[in-house]
Structures are given as C-alpha cells and as structure tokens.
Amino acid sequence: MDDCSGFIETNLPCPDCGSSDALALNENGNTKCFSCGKYTVHENNKTNMTKEEKQKKNADFLYGDLLPIAPRGIHLDTCKKYGYYVGDYNGQRVHIANYRNFEGELVGQKIRDKDKNFTINGKITGHFFGQHLWPNGGKKLIVCEGEIDALTVSQLGSNKYPCISIPSGTNSAKAAFKKNLKWLELFDEVVLMFDMDEPGQKAVSECVNILPPGKAYIAKLPGKDPNELLMQGKAQDVVRAMFDAKQWSPTNIIDGADLFERISTIKKNDSVPYPFEGLNDKTKGLRKGEISLFCAGSGVGKSQVCRQIAHHLLTQTKDKKVGYIALEENIERSAQGVLGLELGKLLHLDDFTVDDKYIKAFNKTVGSGRFFLYDHWGSLNTDQLLSHIRYLVKALGVEYVVLDHISIVVSGMSESEMGNERRAIDVLMTKLRTLVEESNFALILVSHLKRPEGNRGYEDGIMPNLSALRGSQSLSQLSDICVALSRDLQGEDKNITKLSVLKNRFSGDTGLCSQLEYCQRTGRLTETSISEEF
C-alpha cells in the first residue's frame, strides 16, 4: 500500500531517514515519508503478524539496565515505573525511553546520547511516553515536552499522578494530541506543562484548541522546564505550577474576577472638556479610547468646529498633544486657522503683521511643540495614513487626533482598495476602531452626509439623523459619540450653527445641545442660548 491521500498531519520528523519535516500521518496511524519514500503501517493495522515476526521485531529493540539518572535527579523507582533504561548504543552510554501501547507491548524506543542526539527505534509517532500506564484515564493528566520532564513531574507527585510527554519535540505535539484525542477526553483535566521557551509555548497554543472546551489547563513555570527547576532546588515551584494551572480560555475571553484592579483604578470621567458647554453637558467631555463623529452637509461648518476643538485642547491644557489631519486643505491653511483663532483674525483673508503678539500666539498654539499636522498632498494611501496616525500616537505621544474627513479618505482609495464605498468605509472604520482601542487615543472624525430626499438639503437648516450618514452604517455603529451640525446657509440666521447629539454611548443623553454663532471678523464660534423655535 502506498496511498498518499487522507493525511491529517504533515511536516513531521521521519524516524527512518532523519528528515525533520518530510513525514505525513494519516487517520489510521500509517505514515509516509516524502524524503526516503518509506510507507509504514501502524502496528494496530498489522492483522497478520506471525509469532516469528513479533520475535524478530522485539529482537530489534535495545535493552539496558534500570538505574537512577543521578545527574538529572531521577530516582530508580521512577525509571522502573516508566521503563526508562540506561544502555549502550554505537559505543556510547545512552538513555532508552520505552514506548508501549495499551496492551503493554513495546512498540518503539527513543534513544538519547549525552549530546542530546536522538535515535528512534521502532514506532513512537502518535504515542505519548508513559501513556500505557493510564489506559482508562483519570482526574488530572500532566503533559510535558520531554521524557526527563515527565519523569521529574511524576516523581515530584510521588509517582501517583498521570504524567506523560510528547514523542518527538514540539513539532510532534499537535499530531499526538489529535491521534489520542479520545484517550485524552477520558481525563477531567489535561495540564500542559511544556517548556517556557517560544517553541514550547507555541505548541501549547496549538494543542489547547484540539481539546474540548474546559478540559485544557496551562501550567506556568518560573524557569525553562521542570527538570531544570528540580536541579536548581525549586521542586516546590514545579508542584505549585501543576496544581495552580489555570483553565485555558481564548485570550479575548476575560474572567470578570480578574478585572477588579482594572475597573477599580479607572477614573469615572477621565476626559477633557469640549469648548462648548452644551456639548459637554450631554457627552461629559472628550475621552481617550473613543471615536467622536461630527457630521453635517457641505459648508455647514464641520471643519471650523474641529479647528476650535483643536485650539481649545492646545490652549486649555498644558501637556495634551494634538494631531491634525485635514484632507480638504493644505497644512498652511490648517495652521493659519488654529493660529487665527488665538489672534481673533482670519489670517488667510486679512493682512497681518508678524509682531510679538503674533509670535506669542504662534508659540502657544501651532508652535507649541504639541501640534502635529499631516502633509498629505500627492499621496493618500489608506495604510500609509493609518501608519502615520499610529506614529503620531506611539512615537510623538499624541492623545487627540482630528481626521477631517473620512469621505475623502475613501475617495482617494485605489479601485482594488475601494470595491464599493460602503465596503471601503466598513473596512476603514474597523481599522480606525482597532487603532483607537489598541493605542488609546481620542479620534475626532468628520463625515459627509448623503443627499436627503426632496428639495431641501442639509445646507437649508435640516437637522441630520444617523441614517443620513453617507456610505455605511459602520460610521455610527463604531463611533462612541455622533454629533450633527445644522445651519441654514441662505437664511437670516446663516451664522448660527446648531449641534445635536445623535448617539451617546457614554451617558446615553442625546438631543439638541448647543447653538453656536460664527463671527466673520474673528473666525470664532461663540455659544449662545438655543432659540426656542428650533
């Protein structure tokens, strides 16, 4: 038989030719090496083995003496229980680890010399060392990475507790767990006590997903492996790790009992205020780890509100850093807009003199060392933009980022990136949400609106709702705060902008909150009393 189909595990070490990754295992336990070409039938599948064949197979095994392994602190009774011998092989003194099936029949040997070179005699793939001692399962099973570690842990438990090891290093762990899953399920708990190095912990992460939910436990050692700790006089640390092993759960599943310190030290309202009192009353301020979305029709004043928020952060705090990404204007216009708010002048329209007052205002705002802009002209790549935001936060210590606006980010995508606008916004918002969470900064985001039905637009004073957001529901779903701006650009109150909180994940308080009057001389927005007729 030389059927290469149906393999359940590949890239295993071959015991015949020594290849590290050419062996494949099928569901019947048979193996095929794609290096030397040997196909080996599992012992359980050899139904017609004669007495003479069994005698010849047994004659091929290596025999030695039962001795304590003094250099590793392993006692004679432990070696006897597991069948761990000392013998001679190719003129060298070696350790012999016997692997047996559940009938007690010797099926393979792992031979180890003083330099930790291994030779496989017979068949050990798919078997655990020591597995034959507990054919009917039990309460707690400890799985180690190597035979010496299994002997160590068993000995420290007075050889009473089931303890085994994987056959051929970390690369064999996954296949051994899959092959013996039904047997592993006979135990109430399966404790993985692998080496604490990277290969060992990687193997742990692979094996825990094979076991049924609630059965896998992970032991954490204060050293590389159990035998090393034993030889350092830290046997109790191994025993403690065995009994203190924590039940495995996916990393994103958190036991509420582990959250006491985190939720008891978080301030109730670790926020900075907006420059508008009514907005503060509803939202309780601007917080890191949140996305605040501002939406309005074209020309209503979204960018002006963002400039005033940035200016407020720079002038009303002493150490907060602001990242400013305005994609509809160049960085000179953005800088002039923030500086102009401090001077009370429209610098892009009015003549001005660079005097002491100008320099002082510059040093307080744009030149404070706490204001950073993104020069985007000629390049608008989504991944590059996200990378620059991450740099602002991680490298420069920025805590508040203004992105004005998301619609132009999407419009600047390539055809392969975009697909369609809704999908493109979904992807971008998910990436922004993830970035905000992992980097813990506040994102002030601007979005356009889709055109309403009928003759009137949002520029005519209509107050938007969440369904008016252009492109995707993820804009509102992934934002913590949504604020709509309304202004009648052609009406008598064309300089009056009204703010309404459409969504408020923090406090739940929504509705009309602020009325702002724009001064065409100073370029500032000033909060006024809300008109009753609105």
Image: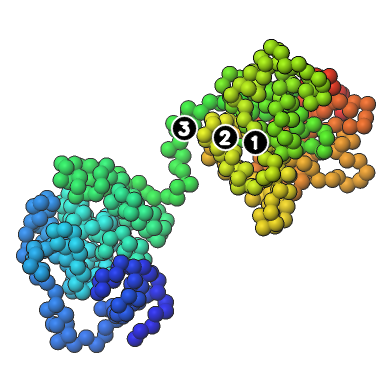
Image side of residue 46 versus residue 446, left or right: left
Residue drawn at x 38%, y 69% as measured from the top left = 9
Relative depth, front residue between 332 and 216: 332
Relative depth, front residue between 254 and 170: 170
Tag 1 and tag 2, C-beta contact below 8 Å: yes
Image side of residue 27 versus residue 304, left or right: left
Q: On screen, 338 above or below 252?
A: above
Amino acid at the residue labelled 3: Arg
**Could you tell me which quadrant the N terminus lies in?**
bottom left
> Where's residue 358, x and y in %?
71, 16
Amino acid at the residue labelled 2: Leu
Q: Nearer the viewer, mark 3 or mark 2?
A: 2
Mark 2: secondary structure: helix
Q: On screen, 131 above or below 4?
A: above
Residue designated by label 1: 374
Residue designated by label 3: 262
Mark 3: secondary structure: helix
> Where's residue 189, x and y in %?
32, 54
Would residue 327 be visible to someone looking at this image?
yes
Residue designated by label 2: 392
Would residue 31 be visible to someone looking at this image?
no
Which label's residue is closer to the chain start, 1 or 2?
A: 1
In the image, farthest residue toward the front: 354
In the image, farthest residue toward the top: 356
Label 1 and label 2: CA atoms lie apart by 9 Å
Q: Quadrant for residue 35, please give it.
A: bottom left
Mark 1: secondary structure: loop
